[in-house]
Structures are given as structure tokens and as C-alpha cells.
Image: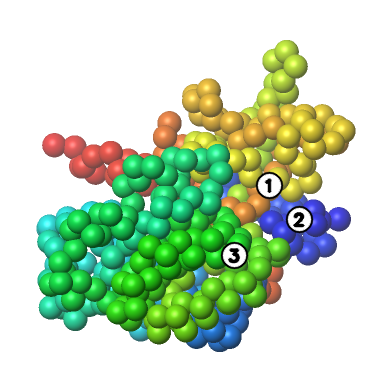
């Protein structure tokens, strides 16, 4: 019987071996049915409220699937030139928004060829680049920092942490804004959430209203940013829609949201096989052909323990044998996590990690010369389409000239 947790709902009543057993490992699989499920939820929010939802490409940028998502979304959000170009090219006819901590002089003219909305991170950047964006007919925005932290435990990832480099506080706004600069602005943008529910959005929006409500009365749009786990089963969509309507009614603005995870949440898998099993004292180490450091770097950077089919994480998860899963690299910390199995995995066993469509293929790397896992799309009829053909060249071309002098 399939694991009932949402990360594996797309498998239905089939086992991972039955679904993925014929694929070479390691590999990523993006499930089109799960993507469509998420897209339909996001489309209903847009239809109910009139807001506009963008795909944040920083979390999911597998453009072969953009055509599937395009009918359900207003466009894409980018973090710089390359993502802006990708969104413009692969979701044509849709909006392309871009926010960057700081823009480069040599890239900005090309960026204006792709972007519809350009959001600046400081009053200084608005002053430097805002006139050019406005003259090019772009909608100009400024990211604000409402100084309202709703995250716990990971201050380094909190855009509202003291001393944050992201967004303009009200004090910075008042110190640097002039009537001429204010006249350039069409909207404000805030992004303070990460994998959070609508109650934290409500708290944040109240802070935005308190600090920037007078400014918003003269704006055309307000972007709520990302971090909204809208497609999670327990997400409070009613409260989200109430927040959207509040902004629309209070300031007469068009509301944008730019989730990344919500678009591809629980829509991907990383399939791996066991290469070796060793015992060191009280620890059973299971070495896979997939690497945390290379193939799921957020496991180390965030950090977190990803869901694994059929084996709960952590020693307190239940009775059984606790095994530590790790990759084959030389990095001692290349550890995916500790999981409880009914019996230890054996060499050749297939293990499948869930929720691997987000922050994986867009962040992976070739440390130690590890091959990049190929990417497959699982069609709604259950068939697979191979989207990539990675090899030695992908490793080598990142490090120097393909031809020796």
C-alpha cells in the first residue's frame, strides 16, 4: 500500500518499484498530474478573487512543464536576467516579473527586453535604474520590509531579521524617497514568508498596512511575494482570499502572489538505489547513488529531512531499524537523514524521496564529478518522457574551455 502522506499521493495504490522500477537511477521525476492538481487550486484562487498568481522560478524552473502550467497562471517571477529570459521565452504571452537584490549595469538593458514588472530592492537602485525602466514602459516596483518576523528557528532565511539586506524599511523609505522617485513607482512588493500558512500572511499584511498603507493608497498593485503554501492540504485558502480582498478594497490595487513551492509542491520524486550498507558502531549507514550535497542541496542548506516512501524520519518515528542515508561523495556531511525501516535496505533496493520538484533541479551541482540525475516527466497516463540527457560534458563545460589550447 502506498504511503498516505501527501508527498506520495501521486503514486495512488502503486509501489515505487511498480511505478519507477524501470528508470535508471538516480533520476528526478516530475508528475504532471500532481502539477495540474496544484495549478487548479491556484486558478480557483485567481478566479474567486481576481488576484494574479506567478510561478517563482527560483523554486521550480523546469520549463518543459511551463506549457502545462501556463493556462492556470498569470506568468512568471524571476530573480535576475537569465530567469527573466527563461520565463519570457517559455511562457510567452504571460507576464514576466523580476526582483533582484541589485541589478548590474551591463545586464539591465537586456533585462528590459524580457521583463514587464521590475522591482527594486533599495531607494538607491530605484534612483539608478528606475527612470530607464519607466521610459521603457515597464511597471516599476519597490520591495519593502515591514519588519514583521513570522518565521521561527532560521533567522538567516528571514527577510525581516534585524539587519536584513532585503527590502526597504519605513525609515529607509522616509530618508531616501523624493517626490520624483515616488512618481516612478507603480507598486510595492513584500516577501517575508517561507512554507507558511495564511495566518502569517494576515499578520504580515497588517504590518504592511501599518507601515506603508499611506504609500499604497497611491499604488496600482501590491505583490504579496512567495512562501504561501497554498496547495498544502491544511492551508487556509479562505483567509488568504480575505487578505487579498482587504488589499483590493483598502487600496484599490491589483494583488499579485508569486509562490514557487505551491506550484510544484509534492509534484516530484528523486529515485535512488542502494549502493552499499555498512555498520559503524550503533549507526547503520546506507550509501545511495544520490547525494544530498549534489542532488538535494536544500537538505543541507535549510536544513531539513526529506520524506522517504515507506520509512518515517527520525529515531522517534516508531519501532524498527534506524538507518542513516547518505550519498557517495567524499563530503562527510553528505547525509540525507536518519530513517526508520522495518528491515535495513539491501544493495540494489529502490528508495524514493518525495517533494523533489522544488529547489532540486534548479540548485543541483556536480561536486566530486557527480553526474547530474536525468529528469523525467510522468504523464497523466502513467507513461514517462525523458527530458534531459546529462553526461560528462555537463560536468566539464562548467569548469573551463571545452577545447585545450
| Residue 315 coordinates in the image, percent (x, y) | 77, 31
- Marks 2 and 1, how far apart in space? 9 Å
Q: Quadrant of the N terminus?
A: bottom right
CB contact under 8 Å: marks 2 and 1: yes
Q: Nearer the viewer, residue 203 or 131?
A: 203
Q: Is residue 374 above or below residue 75?
A: above
| Residue 403 coordinates in the image, percent (x, y) | 20, 42
Q: Is residue 339 above or below residue 387?
A: above
| Residue 275 coordinates in the image, percent (x, y) | 65, 32
Front label number (1 vs 3):
3
Residue at (71% x, 52% y) in the render:
21
Residue 308 visible in rendering: yes
CB contact under 8 Å: marks 1 and 3: no
Q: Is residue 59 above or below residue 344?
A: below
The reply, left or right, for residue 136 in relation to residue 122 is left
Q: Quadrant of residue 282?
A: top right
Mark with earlier residue (1, 3): 3
Mark with earlier residue (3, 2): 2
The reply, left or right, for residue 12 in relation to residue 373 is right
Instruction: Give the residue at mark 2.
Output: 5
Amino acid at each position: 500500500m502506498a504511503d498516505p502522506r501527501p508527498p506520495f499521493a501521486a503514486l495512488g495504490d502503486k509501489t515505487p518499484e511498480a511505478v519507477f522500477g524501470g528508470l535508471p537511477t538516480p533520476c528526478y521525476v516530475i508528475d504532471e498530474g500532481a502539477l495540474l492538481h496544484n495549478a487548479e487550486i491556484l486558478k480557483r484562487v485567481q478566479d474567486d478573487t481576481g488576484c494574479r498568481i506567478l510561478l517563482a522560478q527560483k523554486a521550480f524552473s523546469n520549463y518543459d512543464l511551463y506549457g502545462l502550467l501556463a493556462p492556470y497562471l498569470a506568468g512568471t517571477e524571476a530573480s535576475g536576467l537569465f530567469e527573466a529570459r527563461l520565463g519570457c521565452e517559455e511562457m510567452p504571452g504571460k507576464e514576466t516579473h523580476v526582483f533582484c537584490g541589485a541589478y548590474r549595469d551591463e545586464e539591465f538593458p537586456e533585462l528590459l527586453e524580457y521583463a514587464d514588472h521590475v522591482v527594486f530592492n533599495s531607494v538607491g537602485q530605484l534612483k539608478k535604474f528606475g527612470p530607464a525602466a519607466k521610459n521603457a514602459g515597464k511597471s516599476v516596483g519597490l520591495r519593502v520590509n515591514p519588519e514583521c518576523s513570522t518565521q521561527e528557528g532560521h533567522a538567516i532565511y528571514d527577510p525581516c531579521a534585524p539587519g536584513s539586506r532585503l527590502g526597504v524599511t519605513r525609515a529607509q523609505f522616509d530618508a531616501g524617497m523624493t517626490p520624483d522617485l515616488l512618481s516612478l513607482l507603480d507598486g510595492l512588493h513584500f516577501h517575508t514568508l517561507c512554507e507558511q500558512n495564511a495566518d502569517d500572511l494576515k499578520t504580515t499584511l497588517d504590518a504592511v498596512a501599518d507601515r506603508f498603507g499611506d504609500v499604497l493608497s497611491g499604488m496600482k498593485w501590491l505583490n504579496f511575494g512567495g512562501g504561501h503554501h497554498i496547495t498544502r492540504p491544511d492551508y487556509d485558502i479562505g483567509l488568504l482570499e480575505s487578505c487579498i480582498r482587504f488589499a483590493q478594497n483598502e487600496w484599490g490595487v491589483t494583488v499579485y502572489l508569486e509562490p514557487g513551492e505551491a506550484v510544484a509542491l509534492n509534484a516530484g520524486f528523486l529515485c535512488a538505489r542502494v549502493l552499499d550498507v555498512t555498520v559503524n558502531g550503533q549507526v547503520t549507514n546506507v550509501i545511495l547513488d544520490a547525494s544530498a550535497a549534489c542532488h538535494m542541496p536544500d537538505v543541507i542548506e535549510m536544513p531539513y529531512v526529506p520524506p522517504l516512501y515507506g520509512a518515517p524520519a527520525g529515531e522517534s518515528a516508531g519501532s524498527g531499524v534506524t538507518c542513516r542515508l547518505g550519498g557517495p561523495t567524499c563530503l562527510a556531511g553528505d547525509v540525507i537523514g536518519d530513517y526508520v525501516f522495518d528491515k535495513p535496505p539491501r544493495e540494489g533496493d529502490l528508495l524514493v524521496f518525495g517533494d523533489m520538484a522544488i529547489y532540486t533541479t534548479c540548485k543541483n551541482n556536480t561536486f566530486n564529478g557527480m553526474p547530474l540525475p536525468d529528469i523525467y516527466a510522468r504523464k497523466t497516463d502513467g507513461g514517462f518522457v525523458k527530458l534531459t540527457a546529462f553526461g560528462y560534458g555537463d560536468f566539464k563545460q562548467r569548469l573551463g574551455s571545452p577545447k585545450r589550447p
